[in-house]
Amino acid sequence: MTKTSTKWLLLLLGLTYLLLQLPFIKADPDVEISWSRGANTDEGLHSGQIRNYIHHGKFDITESDNFIKTPLFGAYLYLPLLWLGSSLSVARWAMVFPFFAMLLWVAWRNNYFRNFLFVLMPIALFEYSTFNFAHFSLAEMPSNYFILSGILFFAHSISKHQIWKYAFLIALFISIAFLLKIQFLYIILLPPILFVFYFLKRKTGNGITWKVLLYTNIFLVLIFILYILLWYLPNKDFFNYVMVDQTTNRFAKLPDLFNHVKAIHNIIFLGKYLAPFTIAFYFLFPLGIFLSLKKSNTTFQKIFIGLSIWWLLECHKIGMTYLPTRYLLGFIFSMSAINALVIFELLRLCLENKKYKKWIFIPTIVFGILFVFNIYNYKNAFDRRTYSIRQINQYLSQFEFGERPIIGAWAPSLTWKTNARSYPVWGKYFNDQEVLTQQKPVIIISEVDENDSNQAYLNQGIQIDQHADSIKYFQIHHIKLKLLWMKDL
């Protein structure tokens, strides 16, 4: 097969991947994608402040915690929502197309990368969790794309004249990953670990590699210093306020750690959506280590080492007590990418070396099982589609709200089709004081039991139902919501 035909086939596969996203752009997040409400509320929460700025011309960083947690993500959404309209569909396409196109652009630079995508897309990008979160307007999958792209840049064949260029690109992509969502800050450890590894091997013909990584770390430090000076220090008090809440009591205590990790392993990694990938990983990861120690393809070695360090850095999340699916996406994606890489390398070895050709059925069968499993999950998610969020947005789009806000943790996700100002309410955290007297909301959106606000109203003795002119009830999956039209005060 010629390089030209390979490129056309890759474009066709990429187009197919994008078309497969199309049926989900206007649908609710799949009911089984996460046990938490976050998959349903966070798309609105992460875009709410920038939408308020577009519609009302005022930006208030203290309105929510999202510009602390996802600073670059909110800024990125500004132009798509301003130019194309602040709808959920626009926000989702702003995730699906540009970042996938970026990955294709990175892969286009190298024949090994292009061929690798023929396995990566059906296995890792089509995996149930990564596929679904790829069309959500959330920062997790774009961050994963940037980390993977940074690893591919590192694995690219670099000449002496390109050292500075690729060092900067790697540092930039790693930095963008954590600036999109600060939770990915741990990924800045990837280049230093790679540098130490290749510095120790510098006498074995890796001179350019360790120099690239040295300059990468210098650029990474400079970018991080700029982040501290331009963003952290000007918002220091507010930043620390948010981070204290977001990082306190998040990990299992040491005596409980073993049982906690065991439960996560059995319930999630050996659960119905990840079991085949986890079992495949048990065999493919050690095989990948063996292949990387042999005199195999240098590009494979670099990608495998980069992905493996990434996966090891992700393992700290298994100790977290609050662990919705979106927190595990980096772990799932890096594990699936390792599976895809080792399968691809085995297929390549079998096709290019006659003495291994008889074993080609093994990676082919593993690839087939994982791909068919992904197709099965896709069909089930397709059949389960619901449109409750869209219906509530259409209901509210009939009204004009002026300056009075619509408030509640669900409010930003249910006001996409309006110009209303919306922001969350969380007890003892955000916007929970003087709700009726100072904030004067036109609508309060709340779960019936008020769990979404940590009972912010009830804990202050406020019976919000008594202050409503009328109440409409809705249901999104298993969650019952009440939409309270408030009395004029």
Image (tube, rainbow, N blue to C red):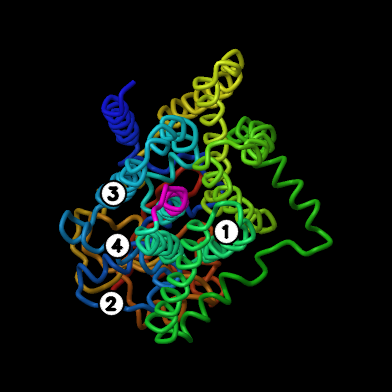
Query: Label 1, label 4: how many angstroms apart (C-alpha)?
Result: 29 Å
Q: Which residue is mark 1?
A: 194
Residue at position x 73%, y 61% in the image: 252
Mark 2 or 3: in front is 3
Q: Which residue is mark 2?
A: 59
Residue type at mark 3 is: Pro
Question: Which one is earlier in the sequence, the residue at label 1 or at label 4?
Answer: 4
- Three-letter amino acid code at the position of disc 1: Leu
* 49 up-or-down from 261: above or below: below
Q: Residues within 10 Å of mark 2 (few under 14, many from 20)?
A: few
| Marked residue nearer the N-terminal end (2 or 4) | 2
Task: For label 3, count other residues whose C-alpha is less than 10 Å away and answer few (under 14), some (14-19) or many (20+).
Answer: few
Q: Secondary structure at mark 2?
A: loop
Q: Are marks 1 and 4 in contact (CB under 8 Å)?
A: no
Residue that appears at 58% across and 42% down:
335
| Residue holding disc 4 | 76
Mark 2 vs mark 3, CA separation in Å: 26 Å
Q: Are marks 1 and 3 in contact (CB under 8 Å)?
A: no
Residue range (magenta): 148-159
